[in-house]
Amino acid sequence: MSSKRKHNEINGDPVPDKHLYKAGGPKDDDVYFMAVALLFAKKSLDPNTKVGACIVNQEGNIVGIGYNKMPNGCEDEFPWERKAENRLDTKYPYVCHAELNAIMNKTSMDVKGCTIYVTLYPCNECAKLIIQSGIRHVVYLTNKYPDTEETQASQRLLDAAGITHRQRNDPCSLLSSIDPSAE
Ligand SMILES: [Zn+2]
């Protein structure tokens, strides 16, 4: 089996090329999917950084949604602080990032060949998850921390694994152009 065919499979069935969803393709649905990621970012209880993620399969269907949150059942147990004398009193050791939650909450058998829309460039830990899950494309809204080691490691990881990553930062203009009262 060629690697091309392998990437074109959903639930074991090969999908004809012409039916494959392509982010940034002529239908430009990626703006809509980024808007969905943005919407779910709003659900985060993090007072400083709200991140949303939306996974789309090769047929153009949403198969996973996530936002940054504390582990299930522990929502009230851990702090959202960014700084503290003891790192154990910050959010960092506990919080589950949007990408992790989107992958874990997937509604499909797997997310191989999928595109993940995320409102913030993935950190290196999420880059590893993305690679290991079989996701092939990352579309991000912002890259607030391009100079951090986490972001640089993430770029190296995604590049080495051949995962595309590109910015799409115009869904806000799309949202403002939607007028529910328009004919
Ligand atoms: Zn992350």
Image (tube, grey):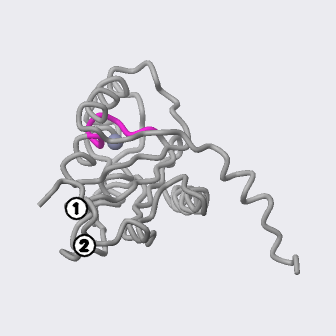
Q: Is residue 124 magenta?
A: yes
Q: Which residues are magenta?
A: 121-127
Whether the residues at callouts 1 and 2 have beta carbons within 8 Å, the answer is yes
As drawn, is 92 to the left or to the right of 146?
Answer: left
Q: Which residue is disc 1 drawn over?
A: 5
As drawn, is 144 to the left or to the right of 4?
Answer: right
Residue nearest the viewer, comparing 169 with 15: 15
Instruction: Indicate the quadrant containing the C terminus: top left, top right, bottom left or bottom right.
Output: bottom right
* Number of residues whose C-alpha sits closer than 10 Å to that of mark 1, classed few (under 14), some (14–19) or many (20 or more): few
Q: Position of residue 85 (x, y in %)?
A: 32, 24
Q: Position of residue 162 (x, y in %)?
A: 28, 38
Residue nearest the viewer, comparing 71 with 90: 71
Q: Does residue 76 sit above or below 51 in this rendering?
A: below
Disc on the earlier residue, 1 or 2? 1
Q: Which mark is residue 14?
A: 2
As drawn, is 157 to the left or to the right of 29?
Answer: left
The residue drawn where x is 52% and y is 62% is 40
Q: Is residue 14 magenta?
A: no
Quadrant containing ligand 1 reads top left
Q: What kind of residue is marked 1?
A: Arg
Q: How many marks are shown on the rendered structure?
A: 2
Q: Quadrant of residue 131?
A: top left
The residue drawn where x is 30% and y is 69% is 106
Confirm or reject: label 2 Cβ below 8 Å from ligand 1.
no
Q: Position of residue 107 (x, y in %)?
A: 31, 75
Say which element carries label 2.
strand
Q: Position of residue 76 (x, y in %)?
A: 36, 58
- Real-space Cα separation, disc 1 to disc 2, in angstroms: 7 Å
Q: What kind of residue is marked 2?
A: Pro
Say which element carries label 1.
helix
Residue nearest the viewer, comparing 170 with 80: 170
Q: Which mark is residue 146?
A: none
